[in-house]
Each structure stands twice: as structure tokens, then as C-alpha cells.
Amino acid sequence: FFDESYYYGNTQTKIIMASWAVEQDAWSWQVERLPELYKTPILDTINSMFDSLGARATVATATIDTTLASAITQNRPMSIT
């Protein structure tokens, strides 16, 4: 699985990306907890879910200029100088 979240500020945007792999049996038992992933603080809830699933996971964050983030999320080409 792969998922991302965006938090927009006035001049910067924080992007959180998570990828994980989990055994199907473990996932099936925890699927009702998916809404918990959207509670804040988001990284804590994601890490809690990964721990309970015994998942192999990577969580990465980046803070970028809001103009660049807007171009990415709207799938527009942008020249970087």
C-alpha cells in the first residue's frame, strides 16, 4: 500500500508519505481501524497501526514550497529555476 497526506501552509506544504506491506490475515483483522489513520497527530496514528499489524513500513516527510506542492497535486508541469 502507499498513501500520502498534504498539509498546506501559507508558504510551505508538508507532505507525509507512507508505504507498507502486511500479511493479508493481519490486515483483515484490523480493517475496521482504518478511520483511525486520519486522526491527528497523523504520524503517531500511522505508527500505531503499523505496530499493531506487524507491518514492514516506511514513513517519510517533506516540506516544500506551496507553489510546487500545488503544481504536483494538480498534475501541472512546472519549470524549476
Image (cartoon, rainbow, N blue to C red):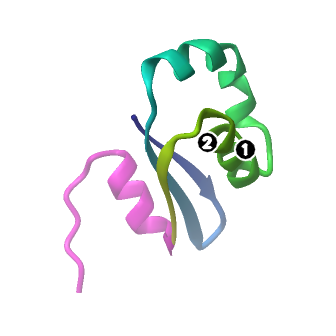
Horizontal side of 15 relative to 52 (left or right) equals: left
* Front residue of 24 and 81: 24
Task: Give the side of residue 5 with respect to residue 22, left or right.
Answer: right
The amino acid at mark 2 is: Phe
Q: Residue 73: horizontal and vertical position, in percent?
A: 39, 48
Q: Which residues are magenta?
A: 63-81
Q: Residues within 10 Å of mark 1 (few under 14, many from 20)?
A: few
Residue 38, above or below 19: above
The quadrant in which the C terminus is found is: bottom left
Near mark 2 (Cα within 10 A), the count class, few <14, some 14-19 or many ≥20, is some
Label 2 with label 1: CB-CB less than 8 Å: yes
Residue at 55% over, 13% down: 28
Secondary element under disc 2, as helix, strand or loop, is helix
- The numbered mark at residue 48 is 1
Q: Is residue 51 above or below residue 67?
A: above
Residue 8, picture quadrant: bottom right
Percent position (x, y) of residue 13? 56, 64
Q: Which mark is residue 68?
A: none
The disc at residue 50 is 2
31 or 52, which is in the foreground? 52
Residue 7 location, x and y as percent?
Answer: 63, 55
Q: Image quarter for residue 48?
A: top right
Residue 70 belongs to the span the image colors magenta: yes
Q: Quadrant of the N terminus?
A: top left
Q: CA distance from mark 2 to mark 1?
A: 5 Å
77 relative to 12 in the view: left or right: left
Q: Position of residue 53 (x, y in %)?
A: 61, 33
Mark 1: secondary structure: helix
Instruction: State the residue lying farthest toward the bottom.
Output: 81
Which kind of residue does numbered mark 1 sit on? Ser
Question: Residue 55 vs residue 36: left or right?
Answer: left
- Residue at (45, 32) in percent of width and height: 22
